[in-house]
Image (tube, helix red, strand yellow):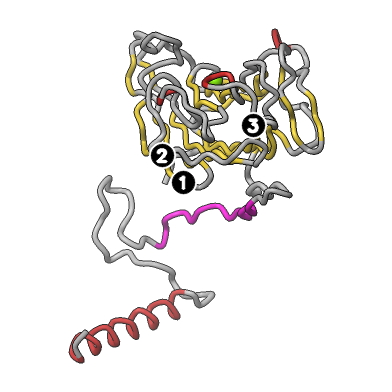
Amino acid sequence: MTRRQANVFGVSAAAAIAVCSLSIGQDAQVGFKDTPMLPGGKWHVHDGDRPRPRVITPGTCSTQQEPGQPPSDATVLFDGKDLSHWRGRRGRPAEWNVEDGAMVIKPGAGEISSAEEFGDCQLHLEFAAPVPARGRDQGRGNSGVMFFGRYEIQVLDSFENVTYADGQAAAIYGQYPPLVNASRPAGQWQSYDIIFTAPRFKPDQSLESPAYVTMLHNGVLVHNHAAVIGAMAYRAVGKYTAHGPKGPIVLQDHGNPVRFRNIWVREISNEH
Ligand code: MG
C-alpha cells in the first residue's frame, strides 16, 4: 500500500467512524434517505426505515460427548428426551428407542415422521452409525432424512464403505453424490445442516420451480443449491407430483440401528 492509499483509507475510515458514532446515538437518525434506491423500489441503500432482523440467540456447537444448544428460534424435534414430536406408522406413536440421549432406529418399527410440517427450512440433525460396523454397501448404517416424506438425503455409514456414488452418505439419493465424502467412522457423531427450498407448483399441478438443497456434512459443503430432480426413487428417475407448501420430515428405517440426536428445524422466511 502506498502512503497516498494509506491516507485515503485513513480518511475514509475516520469518516466511517464519524457516521457510525452519529448513527448509534439514541436520538440520532440511523441510516439514510438520500441514498439511491435498491432494485425493487422499496428501500434506499442503508435505509433507516428498513426493519431490522429479529434478534435471536445463536446455538452452540456439539462435541462428540455433548450435543450443542439449538438457536433460540428453532423448533426442536429431538432434544434427547422423548419422541413426542414424532409419529410412527399411520399416525401411531413412534416406536424407536430412546437411549443415552439418542433416538435409535428399532429395526422393523418403520419410518417416523415429524408431527409438525415444514416448507422452506433449515434442518440440523446428528447421527451415528452402529458399532461395530456391520454389512457393506447399502447394508451398513442405512437410513435417510426425507423432506415432505419424499425428497431424500441419504444417511449411510460411508466411512471406508463403497457403494454407488448417488447412494452414499449425504447424497441426494439417486440424483447427486455429495461433493466430497466427509464421513466419520461408525459410532462417531456426524452432523447434517441442510437448507431446503420446497418445490413450487402451478395451479394446474405442473412444476413451477424444483426443490433446492444446500448442505453441509460435518461442516463441509456437499451440495450447493442443487436442483432436486424429483421425489426419491430406487432404480428410476424421480418425478414431481404436486403437493402442498408444507410436509413432514421423515426418518427412514432400513433395519440398521442408526442413532440420532440434536434435531432442530428453523422455518425460512424469504422476506428481507
Ligand atoms: Mg436411505
Label 2 near label 1: C-beta < 8 Å?
A: yes
**In the displayed structure image, the side of residue 111 where residue 42 appears, left or right:** left
| Spot occupied by residue 76 in the image (x, y as percentages of width and height) | 68, 37
Q: Which one is closest to the eye, mark 1 or mark 2?
A: 2
Q: Residue at coordinates 47% horizontally, 32% vertically from top-left?
A: 196
Label 3 near label 1: C-beta < 8 Å?
A: no
Q: Residues within 10 Å of mark 3 (few under 14, many from 20)?
A: many
**In the displayed structure image, the side of residue 42 where residue 22 appears, left or right:** right
Earlier residue among tags 1 and 2? 2
Which label sits on residue 266? none
Residue type at mark 1?
Answer: Val
Q: Quadrant of ligand 1?
A: top right
Q: Residues within 10 Å of mark 1 (few under 14, many from 20)?
A: some
Q: Considering the numbered disc 3 on the image, is that residue within a helix, a strand or a loop?
A: loop
Q: Magenta-highlighted stretch: main secondary structure?
A: loop
Q: Residue at coordinates 78% horizontally, 18% vertically from top-left?
A: 95
Earlier residue among tags 1 and 3? 3
- Per the model, the C-alpha gap separating discs 1 and 3 is 19 Å
| Spot occupied by residue 80 in the image (x, y as percentages of width and height) | 77, 37
- Per the model, the C-alpha gap separating discs 2 and 3 is 19 Å
Which label sits on residue 180? 2
Q: Which one is closest to the eye, mark 1 or mark 3?
A: 3
- Per the model, the C-alpha gap separating discs 1 and 2 is 8 Å
Numbered circles on residues, count = 3
- Quarter of the rendering containing residue 126: top right
When the figure is inspected, residue 66 is found, relative to residue 108, above or below; the finding is: below
When the figure is inspected, residue 32 is found, relative to residue 236, above or below; the finding is: below
- Tag 3 residue: 129
Q: Residue at coordinates 72% horizontally, 18% vertically from top-left?
A: 87
Residues shaded magenta: 48-61
Which label sits on residue 220? 1
Q: Considering the numbered disc 2 on the image, is that residue within a helix, a strand or a loop?
A: loop
